[in-house]
Every structure is written in structure tokens, then in C-alpha cells.
Image (cartoon, rainbow, N blue to C red):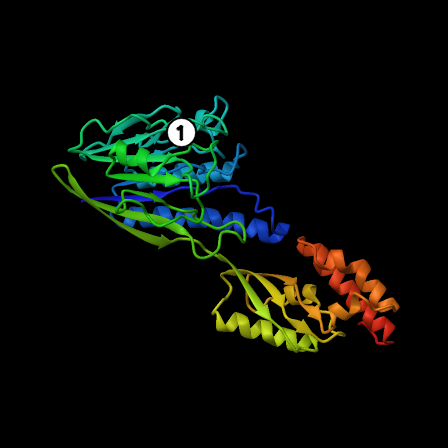
Amino acid sequence: MIKILHTGDVHLDSAFSGLDSRHAEIRRNELRAAFTSMMTYARTAGVDLILIAGDLFDGGYITRETVALLLREFERFEKPVFIAPGNHDPASSDSVWTKITFPENVHIFRESSLSSADVPDLPVTVYGFGFTANDLVTVPVENMHVADPSRVNLLVCHCDMPGVKSSTKDCPMTAEHLDAFGADYAALGHIHNPPAPGHDGRWCYCGCLEARAFDETGPKGACIVEIDKTGTTSSVTIKKVRFSKRRYEKGELALTGMATQADVREAVAAYVAQNRYGEDTLLSLRLTGVVAQSLVIDTEALENSPCGLFLLRVEDATLPDIDCAALEHDPTITGELYRILKPSIESDDIRTREVAVRAFRYALSALAGEKTF
């Protein structure tokens, strides 16, 4: 049996640009820690080799700290590591792949054409190719086939797949390409929210090691792949292992009938508790429903008291308890104000919509002679 750790889309030194500077720095450090945890697992769990399917780095700028971390962890692993550069970290002439001397156990597929390497002391051949620029419009395995079907043949690469992400710039691989190539297992990278493995586990996207935005929800990690082969017949078992320190989640909470900020705080706290979110969670929460006219939801206050979460982002999509249809024809200043704000209230832009609804609420309170603080 051959045991493989399949990872990719690590994006070391990511900017985490969607976060404030404090949270971004924490997340960068946690990403390095997740990588270290993964490598420790590989050393202690009997992994025979590691396949890294592109985008190990987020871009061309790599810190000395990250370089030192990689070299240390690869040296400590000792067994073979195969890396296929991706569209974020292509193996161009002036890239990190040419500037850094990696340990002898690390093999980097620096060419956009297919090549292979045998694993010492194991009946395993690893095929791969890498991006050499940000785009790769060809499919290097097209019309190719493994040389010796009796060996355990692996493919590691960064690629797109029609119907999954569908970009012709990022090596538009198809299931037919992979089936025709004949690898026992194809370790793929590029899709952060991966689909189920294809063709009885013959190919699989590993997903990202740590999520970096709210469109990458749930725990993240890497694949542990076990391959048994007798003659030319093999069986593949894939297990997902979580290494992420945090997880991003998105949710929606209906606040219909609520009248005070205290009501809202209690509802948010109950939502967090019900879903068992905690310090490992970054939550984007959309508030909906029809609430009291006078209620101006203080999203900033909610975000600054995140109910035990690592981070809380709140979108106020609630509406005041008014008759919008009647306001369309209301001849008073209230109706005119509604008609002026209506395009912004119905905007597709979250921030525009939230500001417009809040402005309308403040105006209603002012017209009623109420305090708005």
C-alpha cells in the first residue's frame, strides 16, 4: 500500500486583504501553523510521499520566514515531495522556484510540458507539469498515457475542469483527459471548494489548506490517499483531514418583529450558540425580516461584540415595518423620500442598500420627532 498526502492551494503569505491588519496578520501566522501541522502529520502518520498541486505561494513575494519554514519542514520530512507550480506561483525564470535551493527530497515540475520521476525504493512514478506563467491554455496530458501500467502511477498538477470553474486560461483539463492518461490517482489543485472525487477516486481536488474568504466556507485541510495495487488493478481510498485553524461560515437570520438593539443582540448570540460556532469561526451574517420602524440596527456594535467568534461581519438587509406599496403613491414628504431612496434600497450592492435603509429609518424617526440614538 502507498500512502500519499495530497495538498495544494496553500497560498502562503496571502494578504488576507478582506480583513483588517490585526486579523490579517493573525491569519497569515495561522496559515503557516496549519502548514506545519500538516507536515507533522505527514511525518508521524506513515505518509510515503507528498504531492503539492500548485499555489503553494500566493504570489511572487515570499517572506524569509516562510522560506525558512518550508525548507525546515521539507528537510524534516525526508521522504519525497513533488510540487507542481500553479497560476499564482508559476515557475518563471525569476520565480522563487529558481531562487531557492530546495532539499534533495523535493522535486519541482518546472516545465509546462509533462515529465515524470520515479520514487526511490517504491514502485511509484509521479508525473506532473507546472505553470510557467499565470496562464496555461494547453492540457499537457492530452494524447499522453502512463508508460508502465504495472507501477503505481500518479499525476500532480494545477488545472481547471469544465463545469467546476470553467476557465480556459488555467489548463482546461477534462475527466476524459484524465481517464485516457491512465494514472492510478491524479492529485489536482486550483478549486478551493472541491467537488466529490471523480471516477472512483481516480482524480480529486484537495481544496485549500486554510480558507481566506467567505466564499470558502467550512473546515479545510488536505487529502490522505491510500493506493493498493496488484498487477494493473488498483484501489484508491481518500480521506479528508482538517488542518485549518479557522473556518469561514455564512448565514442568514430573520429578525421579523424585533424592536430594539437588545433583541437583535440576543438573537445573534442565540444563532451563534445554536450553530455551535466559536473562536475558530469567521461568520458573515445577513440580517433579514421586517422590524420596527424606529429600529436602526447598529452593525458596528454587533461586530465589535462578536459573541465568542474570531470575527463577525454583519449585513443589515432588514426592512422597516412600512407599506412600501402605499409609499409609492404617498404625496407626503415620507413618500417622496421613499421614492428617492428606493433605487438604493433595492440596489444589488450590499453597502449601498444598507446605507439607504438606515437613512430612511433615521428620516422616519426624525419626522416622528423621535431620537435616533
In the displayed structure, 291 sits above or below 134; it is below
Q: Is residue 295 above or below residue 340?
A: below
Q: Can residue 80 be spotted in the picture?
A: no
Residue assigned mark 1: 130
Q: Secondary structure at mark 1?
A: loop
User: For residue 234, what is the image quadrant?
Assistant: top left
Residue drawn at x 57%, y 49% as measured from the top left: 25
- Which residue: 45% across, 37% down? 55
Instruction: Tell me where residue 217 appears, x and y as whole percent.
Output: 48, 55
Badge count: 1
Task: Say whether residue 177 is left or right of residue 16.
Answer: left
What is the residue that sits farthest to the front in this orientation? 329
Pick the front one: 217 or 21: 217
Q: Is residue 347 above or below residue 264?
A: above
Residue 252, x across and y down, in percent: 56, 65
Q: Which residue is rendered at x = 35% and y = 50% of the image?
A: 196
- In the rendered view, does 77 fall on the left or right side of 306? left
Q: Amino acid at mark 1?
A: Gly
